Structures are given as structure tokens and as C-alpha cells.
Image (cartoon, rainbow, N blue to C red):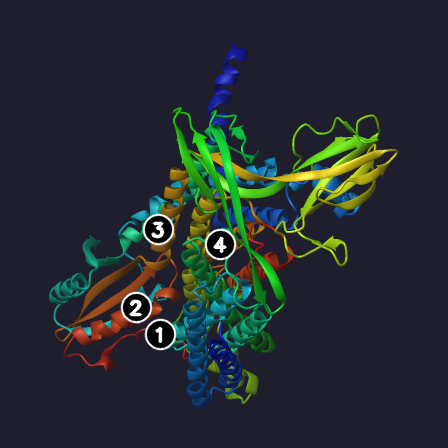
């Protein structure tokens, strides 16, 4: 019996302990400096991602950084920081912090209770003596504030009647709206992670590529570019002006349509957007041995691709296309257009680079041992990106909700005036007025001074000298 | 462009630089001496420089048909013009001409540096050939310019705050926020502020009678500090300028994302420029959050404003010049 009772007796204490821990955790997460600390960590991680190049091969970091630093980058996922557990974890904590602050502070405080205050204890306060008995003065004050767009309410506390005037009370929801926007952005991003996809592909002129996720076919009929020489103060610069792909796209609905795809003008294939992203010159390489063709690459190579020379340990990698070879120097010229084209190739023996050369197009070069290599012709190819992102509308709405929340919370200051009127003899009343805002007192000081000045003007027959306390004034400029 | 048009361009540019350089010196003199004559000379010079710059950018566009904000020269030029414009608006509205010296000086430096990137009139690369460039870039530059003005206000705030702390310390009792939090109200009626603020209730002012007393005793530095706007006013001005900049930066990031979706296929690519802008946004969002806290409002938020502008400089110039990415257009 005692064994079975002990846990039952401990349960309330355990529940109380859990509730206390939960309460303390929520209070911690709702604490503004804690949330800002998380923002600071987020900023630092993001900054690291700006400084350390992302998504490169491990060998890049080994070459670019001192060994201990390179190891640190790779072990801490800094090379892919935006998708690292630490980064996503911080974002998760920020959302938790926002949720805690929203539910424990923002929402409960959106409609603050009407309570009496000690007028003199509030920094923004003033006292005025005005003509009239308290009831008449209260009525005048209510009319005064109502006519200026203040929401006026009256409450009695312990036999004393208080007047409360609120302005822009609705703007107390600004922070809530901004937080909702942030959450919507996170939801939209999650929708993409869960259901969207993206990728890239390159297609040679006259060939067809297929998007693997949805079977959309893109047949490139022609790719064209325009590069203009422009005279600048530093000399001639060859400025890209236009890239355009003429294609036929067969989307999921099976219908083939003509598509002109250029930068800033993506093509919408049943919800999957296809973007012009890059272009290049694929090269048809030919290899001969003692004048006899030997098997080489079975397709034109793009920059970075290579092949093994048949029957040897040597490999050739196509590094980059040179539009114009400067005949005077034999070096690549500045003009990227294919006037007198060539290619830069790198030769490897096994994995070891053994040299590079600039090959004019159509001119065979001797590789030794009877082998000759020729870059026979170039074929333009077009590089595309594609993306299916059903989360975009949610992200877009979230972004504008966030912006709206920011504008509401920054440009509208919800303010409350506490007004008490007391009999002060000789047919006059003393008006005590104090103001609070959600943004502190200084930001409302000018406005409060204007209100008090307007009250003075509106309260006839009692000279200023009778005021019990001066209206607040900002420091002299 | 023909030589006549080139000449017009150069005249406008040199007018702007000369007006800024002179205006900055004169407004610095106003900052130091509070002689109203300097303000009367410096303010028109700042406005002249701003107008000359805006006209220069407009004529560039009109004469060449090329949107002038496709390179670093154009954007720095707009940055300095908008920085001065925002300052002038705030100065007219809130009588804040004291900030003019640093603002116009930064604008002059930005414009002078921008001219080193002025390569002439180059058509835009395909990625920049979009109507978005006429929306996104001016919004982002306006945000940068707002933060520059806020930075200058923060510097003056810090100068005054530390000056006052020094006089208070010299008097033997620091009566600032930290020292008096929770204690009895501090009588501020001798200082520039005239209402009895209890620091614990959330005032940004740490004005102390010590500075006033030192000023009354003839201390020149104290007299100069007394002439500056109150810390509360400077804090409110700094907050208001950042309240202009933060929504603009948010809108700039949003319009940039919309453009990126159209040009690159994704609204967010984790490009260095995007992420550096995000860092700045986070810093200023942190500023706004902490500014709601009485114990943080004041010197600490002023330092956050300074840090925020450092991230803006990194995002604007550092990323453009030193880090390659999708925003690395030929400048």
C-alpha cells in the first residue's frame, strides 16, 4: 500500500515543479534581452556565413585557410552554415521566444486595464487649475479629447471619478502583427522545404533536357547573347547586354509551347519557373594518334569537364573558353566574343596536373607520342535554373504583414492619458493629467506638451500662474 | 555622351562636392560655436549640394537613357544626397541642425569616394535590366542614408552622455541611470530638462546638475555640453531616424527578394549581400526591441546604433568590393 501511495503523493509536487519550471522557461523566453541575445547570435552566425564562402569543396577551405581554421570550418558546418543544425536551432529558439513574448506580453497588454495612478509619479504629468466645478470640467475635458480623436472612458475608483483617454490603442497590436508576419515567413519557407524543389541544368543548342522532378522537357532551339564594347574612362569594357534562349517547353500538361527565356523574364511551366541563368561554349574535342582518330569524348564538353586520352594515363580537362586570342601576344584577349576563339586546357597525368595550354580552335596541337588534340568547334549552350516553390505566396504575405506590423508599431504611438479632476475652491477645479505610452515617455513629450498647451487654451478664465505644476518641456536645443 | 553634356555633368558634380565640403565645415563650426550665422550659411550649402546631386543624377538619366543607379558611383551619389535630404527634413522639423556637420561631412566623403568608381556611362548588365532596379535600389539607399543620419545623432548622444558622466564623476557622485535606479527621484530642475523624471521610470536622460553647475562655474566644455540638445531629445531623434530606416530596409529586402525571384529563381539565395543586409536588419530590430526597455535605452542603444551603421557600411561597401556574389556587378 505504501509503495502505491508514495507516487500518488508525489504527483502534485511534481506537477507543481513542472509548472514552475515551465513558467520560468516561458518567462525567460519572453524576456526581451533574452530574445535580443538570440537575435545577436543569429546575426553573428549570418555574418560568419557572409565572410566564409559557402558551399565550397573541402579542398577549397584547406587551401584558403590555415589548417586548424579549415578543420574548424568543416567540423562546425560553417561551410554550410545556413543549413547547419546550429543556425536552424537558433531560428527555432527565436520563434519560441517570439511566441512566448507574444502570448505572455504582447497579447495580454494589447488592451491594458483602466486603473487609477499617482499622477505625480508619472514623469509626463501636469496640473492645471481651470474654471468650473468638477462635473462641468470633466464634461468639457471629455468633449475636448473626443473632438481630437481620443477614446474617452470614465471609471470611478473609491468614489473618485477618473477619465481615461486613449489614442491609437489599435496600434498596440503592431508588435503582434509583426510577429505573425515573421512566423508566416517561416511557414512559407517550411512549405518549400517540404514540397518544393529546385535545380539547374544546361542544354546544348538543338538538344533537349528534362527536369527530373516533374518531367518538363526543355528543347533549346537557339541561344543568343549580345555583348557590346563600351568606352569607359578605364578603356574599352565588353559589357553583356542580353542573354536569350529560344526554346520549346513541354510541361506536365503535355502541351508544347514556344518559350523565350531571358534574364529577369522566367518562363512559367505549370507552376515551375525556368530561369535563364548562364551560358557557355561547349567544345567538340578530337584526338588522333599517328593521324588515326582515337575514341574521345562522346559529346561536346562544357567548362570543367574532361576526358582520358585513350590508351594513355593522360587526361585533358577543358578549363575555359577564350573568345579572342590576341595574335600579337598569343594570350587571351579582352574581347569575350568568339572572333578568333580558342580554349584553355589542362593536361593531367593521373591526378597530377602537368601543364596547360591555349589551343586555337580548329588547329591540332601535338600531345607527344604521336597524339594530337584539336578543339574542333564550339556549340553554344544555355544554363537554366528551375524552381517550384508553393510557399512563395505565404512568404510574400508574411513579408508584407511583417512590414505592416513594423510600420504600425513604429509610426503610431499608443498613448493613454489619466485625468483626475478635483474641486479646488472658488469655483475652480484642479485637473491632473499624466500620460503613458508603450515606448517610454521621451518619445511622447512633445506631443504631451502640445496637449497641455491646448488644454490651457481651452480652459478659460484661470491664469497660468495658478497652475500647480508646469507642463513638461524638452531640454533646450 | 557629347562634351557639352559631359560638362554639365561635371559642373553639377563639382558644385555638389564643393557645397558639401564647405557646408560641412560651416556646420561643424555651428556645432562647435552655436553661432546662428554658421547655420544660416551651412544649411543652404547642404541643400544646394543635395539639389545639385539629384539634378546631376537626373540629367545623367535624361541624357543617356541609362538608369544612373547601376553602379557604385550612382548609388553612393544617391546615398549622400538622401543622407543630406533626410537630415534637412529632420533639422527643419525638429531643429536638429547641430547634426549637420557630421552628416554633410560623411555625405561629402561618400560622394568623393563614389567619383573614384565613376567609369562613365555603361549600359546595365542583363541582371540589372529590370524595373525593380528603380524600386529596390532607391529604397535600400534611403535606408542606408537614414542609418547614416542616425549614426551621426548617436555619436553626438554618446559625446554628450560621456561628457556629462565625466562631470558627474568629477563631482563625486554619478547620478546616472545605473546609480539611481530604484532610488528616489533625481531633481533635474537645474539641468536643461525641466520635468522630474525618475530614471527608473524609463527616461533616457542622464542629464545631471553637475554639468549645469560646472557650466555656471565657467567650465567651457560644460557650457558647450549644456548647449547640446538634451540626451532625451537626442535619443528620441535617433529612434525616429532609425524608425524611418528600419521599415525602408525591410521593404528593400522584400523588394530585393521579389526581384531575386524574378531574376535568379529564388527569393532568397543566401548571397553575401542579402545576408549582410539581414545582419543589419537584425541589429536594428534588436535596437528597436531594446529601446522599449528603460534600462537599455540611452547609451547602450546609442552604441547599438553605431554598431548597426558599421554593419551597413560592411553590407554596402565591404560586400560590394571585397566579397564576390550575385551582387558583384562590374562597378
> Marks 1/4: CA distance?
37 Å
In this view, B11 is above or below B200: below
| Contact, mark 2 vs mark 4 (Cβ under 8 Å) | no
Q: Which mark is residue B93?
A: 1
Quadrant containing the C terminus of chain B is bottom right
State the count of labels.
4
Chain bearing tag 3 is: A
Q: Earlier in the sequence, mark 1 or mark 4?
A: 1
Residues indicated by labels 2 and 1 sit on the same polypeptide chain: no
> Marks 2/4: CA distance?
48 Å
Q: Nearer the viewer, residue A228 or B85?
A: A228
| Residue highlighted by disc 4 | B128
| Contact, mark 1 vs mark 3 (Cβ under 8 Å) | no
Residues indicated by labels 3 and 4 sit on the same polypeptide chain: no
Circle 3 packing at 10 Å, graded few (<14), some (14-19), many (20+), is some
Chain bearing tag 4 is: B
- Residue drawn 49% across the image and 31% down it: A218
> Marks 3/2: CA distance?
26 Å
| Residue highlighted by disc 2 | A448
In this view, A398 is above or below B295: above
Expressed as whole percent of the image width and height from the top left, the position of residue B49 reads: 46, 79
Residues indicated by labels 1 and 4 sit on the same polypeptide chain: yes
| Residue highlighted by disc 3 | A404
Label 1: element kind: helix
Label 2: element kind: helix
Amino acid at each position: 500500500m505504501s509503495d502505491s501511495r508514495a507516487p500518488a503523493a508525489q504527483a502534485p509536487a511534481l506537477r507543481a515543479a513542472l509548472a514552475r519550471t515551465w513558467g520560468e522557461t516561458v518567462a525567460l523566453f519572453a524576456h526581451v534581452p533574452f530574445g535580443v541575445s538570440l537575435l545577436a547570435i543569429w546575426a553573428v552566425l549570418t555574418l560568419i556565413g557572409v565572410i566564409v564562402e559557402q558551399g565550397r569543396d573541402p579542398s577549397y577551405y584547406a587551401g584558403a585557410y590555415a589548417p586548424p581554421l579549415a578543420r574548424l570550418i568543416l567540423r562546425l558546418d560553417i561551410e554550410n552554415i545556413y543549413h547547419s543544425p546550429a543556425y536552424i536551432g537558433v531560428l527555432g529558439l527565436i520563434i519560441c521566444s517570439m511566441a512566448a513574448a507574444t502570448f505572455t506580453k504582447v497579447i495580454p497588454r494589447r488592451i491594458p486595464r483602466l486603473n487609477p495612478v499617482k499622477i505625480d509619479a508619472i514623469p509626463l504629468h501636469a496640473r492645471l487649475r481651470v474654471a468650473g466645478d468638477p462635473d462641468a470640467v470633466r464634461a468639457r475635458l471629455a468633449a475636448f479629447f473626443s473632438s481630437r480623436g481620443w477614446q474617452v472612458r470614465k471609471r470611478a475608483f473609491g468614489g473618485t471619478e477618473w477619465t481615461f483617454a486613449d489614442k491609437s490603442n489599435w496600434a498596440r497590436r503592431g508588435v503582434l502583427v509583426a510577429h505573425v508576419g515573421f512566423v508566416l515567413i517561416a511557414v512559407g519557407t517550411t512549405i518549400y522545404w517540404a514540397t518544393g524543389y529546385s535545380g539547374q541544368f544546361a542544354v546544348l543548342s538543338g538538344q533537349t533536357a528534362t527536369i527530373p522532378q516533374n518531367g518538363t522537357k526543355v528543347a533549346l532551339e537557339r541561344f543568343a547573347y549580345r555583348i557590346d564594347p563600351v568606352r569607359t574612362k578605364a578603356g574599352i569594357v565588353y559589357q553583356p547586354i542580353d542573354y536569350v534562349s529560344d526554346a520549346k517547353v513541354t510541361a506536365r500538361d503535355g502541351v508544347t509551347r514556344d518559350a523565350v527565356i531571358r534574364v529577369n523574364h522566367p518562363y512559367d511551366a505549370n507552376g515551375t519557373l525556368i530561369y535563364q541563368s548562364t551560358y557557355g561554349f561547349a567544345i567538340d574535342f578530337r584526338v588522333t594518334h599517328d593521324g588515326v582518330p582515337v575514341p574521345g569524348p562522346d559529346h561536346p564538353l562544357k567548362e570543367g569537364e574532361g576526358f582520358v586520352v585513350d590508351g594513355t594515363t593522360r587526361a585533358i580537362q577543358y578549363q575555359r573558353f577564350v573568345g579572342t586570342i590576341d595574335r600579337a601576344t598569343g594570350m587571351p584577349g579582352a574581347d569575350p566574343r568568339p572572333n578568333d576563339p580558342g580554349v584553355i586546357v589542362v593536361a593531367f597525368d593521373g591526378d597530377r596536373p602537368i601543364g596547360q595550354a591555349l589551343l586555337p580552335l580548329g588547329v591540332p596541337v601535338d600531345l607527344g607520342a604521336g597524339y594530337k588534340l584539336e578543339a574542333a568547334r564550339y556549340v553554344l549552350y544555355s544554363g537554366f535554373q528551375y524552381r517550384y516553390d508553393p510557399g512563395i505566396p505565404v512568404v510574400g504575405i508574411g513579408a508584407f504583414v511583417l512590414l505592416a506590423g513594423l510600420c504600425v508599431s513604429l509610426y503610431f504611438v499608443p498613448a493613454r492619458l489619466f485625468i483626475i479632476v478635483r474641486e479646488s475652491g472658488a469655483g475652480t477645479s484642479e485637473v491632473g493629467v499624466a500620460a503613458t505610452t508603450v515606448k517610454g515617455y521621451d518619445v511622447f513629450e512633445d506631443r504631451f506638451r502640445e496637449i497641455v498647451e491646448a488644454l490651457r487654451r481651452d480652459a478659460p478664465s484661470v491664469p497660468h500662474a495658478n497652475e500647480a505644476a508646469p507642463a513638461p518641456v524638452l531640454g533646450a536645443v | 555622351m557629347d562634351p557639352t553634356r559631359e560638362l554639365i555633368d561635371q559642373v553639377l558634380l563639382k558644385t555638389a562636392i564643393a557645397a558639401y565640403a564647405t557646408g560641412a565645415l560651416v556646420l561643424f563650426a555651428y556645432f562647435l560655436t552655436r553661432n546662428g550665422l554658421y547655420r544660416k550659411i551651412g544649411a543652404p550649402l547642404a541643400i544646394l549640394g543635395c539639389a545639385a546631386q539629384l539634378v546631376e543624377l537626373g540629367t545623367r538619366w535624361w541624357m543617356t537613357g541609362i538608369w544612373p543607379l547601376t553602379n557604385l558611383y550612382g548609388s553612393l551619389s544617391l546615398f549622400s544626397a538622401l543622407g543630406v535630404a533626410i537630415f534637412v527634413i529632420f533639422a527643419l522639423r525638429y531643429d536638429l541642425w547641430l547634426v549637420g556637420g557630421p552628416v554633410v561631412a560623411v555625405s561629402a566623403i561618400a560622394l568623393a569616394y563614389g567619383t573614384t568608381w565613376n567609369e562613365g556611362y555603361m549600359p546595365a548588365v542583363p541582371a540589372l535590366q529590370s524595373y525593380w532596379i528603380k524600386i529596390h535600389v532607391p529604397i535600400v539607399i534611403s535606408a542606408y542614408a537614414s542609418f547614416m543620419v542616425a549614426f551621426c545623432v548617436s555619436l553626438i548622444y554618446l559625446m554628450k552622455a560621456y561628457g556629462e558622466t565625466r562631470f558627474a564623476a568629477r563631482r563625486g557622485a554619478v547620478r546616472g541611470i545605473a546609480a539611481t535606479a530604484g532610488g528616489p527621484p533625481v531633481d533635474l530642475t537645474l539641468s536643461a530638462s525641466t520635468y522630474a523624471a525618475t530614471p527608473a521610470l524609463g527616461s533616457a536622460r542622464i542629464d545631471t546638475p553637475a554639468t549645469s553647475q560646472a557650466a555656471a562655474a565657467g567650465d567651457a566644455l560644460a557650457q558647450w555640453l549644456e548647449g547640446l540638445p538634451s540626451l532625451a531629445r537626442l535619443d528620441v531623434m535617433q529612434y525616429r531616424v532609425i524608425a524611418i530606416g528600419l521599415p525602408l530596409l525591410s521593404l528593400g529586402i522584400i523588394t530585393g527578394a521579389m526581384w531575386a525571384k524574378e531574376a535568379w529563381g529564388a527569393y532568397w539565395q543566401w548571397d553575401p549581400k542579402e545576408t549582410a543586409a539581414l545582419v543589419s536588419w537584425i541589429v536594428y530590430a534588436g535596437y528597436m526591441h531594446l529601446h522599449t526597455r528603460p534600462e537599455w535605452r540611452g547609451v547602450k542603444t546609442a552604441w547599438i546604433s553605431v554598431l548597426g551603421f558599421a554593419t551597413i557600411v560592411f553590407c554596402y561597401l565591404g560586400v560590394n568590393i571585397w566579397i564576390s556574389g550575385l551582387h558583384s556587378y562590374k562597378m
